[in-house]
Image (cartoon, rainbow, N blue to C red):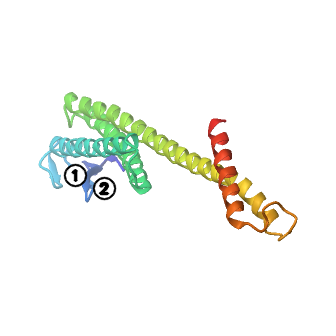
Amino acid sequence: MVYIFSEGGYTIIQFPMVYIEDGDVAEEEVELVVDASGKVVKGPYATVQDAYSKALENLSKALQHTETFLDQLEYKLEMEEKVNPGDVYTASYMAHFLHYATLQLYFAGRELRRRGHIPHKLYGYSRRLLRRAHVVRRYARDIRLLHATVVQLSLDASMKKLTWLGTLAMPALIITGFYGMNLEWLPLADNPPAVFLILSLVTAVFAYVINKV
């Protein structure tokens, strides 16, 4: 979260610092206490500009990492390689997380520029990163849709194969149903090899007809 407020003659500034850790995004809060002259009297950075610049640098690296991750997923999906659904979820989470963090830093930059703590150039950089975060989030959404489409097509192909096999088995089921009654008056009832030959021929012809339809 972003907090910028004045208290007791000092300005308290707090904004998120995001970074990549073990292939995922992580966040920590940076808090600075600034006096009336703009000097940092408490905090891990010498100046507000240094802290904000570092936050934007880490954010840019995180966005680049997420884009690369999404590129890899897109390549696998297009090449019909196996994709772990958990990776798609992780990429989507990272994109949305970074989009929110970018919004926070953008609003922080706007207020810090208004107070004179950072130059306009640094604020402009945060605005460019926000546009990039919008693109990454849309990219993640497209990857989710692509993955869902690939899964649906795979299910359709499986159902088509099962339907084909079930239809192909119909003549065999009908013929074996009759001959399984042990009725002596059926043709070739006493000649199992001939029955199996007829069964094979009928199944082959039926399969040929199905493929032509």
Kind of residue at badge 1: Val
Mark 1, residues whose alpha carbon is within 10 Å: few (<14), some, or many (≥20)?
some
**Relative height, residue 59 to residue 181 (above, below):** above
Residue 133 x, y percent position in the rendering: 35, 37
Q: Which comes sooner in the sequence, label 1 or label 2? A: 2
1 on left or right of 194: left
- Mark 1 secondary-structure assignment: strand
Mark 2, residues whose alpha carbon is within 10 Å: few (<14), some, or many (≥20)?
some
Q: Residue at x 66, y 42 (%)?
A: 210
The image's mark for residue 19 is none
Residue 207 x, y percent position in the rendering: 64, 46
- Mark 2 secondary-structure assignment: strand
Q: Nearer the viewer, residue 117 or 152?
A: 152
CA separation in Å, label 1 and label 2? 30 Å
157 on left or right of 173: left
- Cβ–Cβ under 8 Å for marks 1 and 2: no
Q: Residue furthest bottom?
A: 182
Q: Nearer the viewer, residue 192 or 21?
A: 192
Q: Which residue is mark 2?
A: 24
Corner quadrant of residue 67:
top left
Residue 130 x, y percent position in the rendering: 33, 35
Q: Residue at x 30, y 55 (%)?
A: 24
Corner quadrant of residue 98:
top left
Q: Nearer the viewer, residue 123 or 168?
A: 168
Kind of residue at badge 2: Asp
Q: Which residue is mark 1?
A: 33
**Relative height, residue 132 to residue 66 (above, below):** above
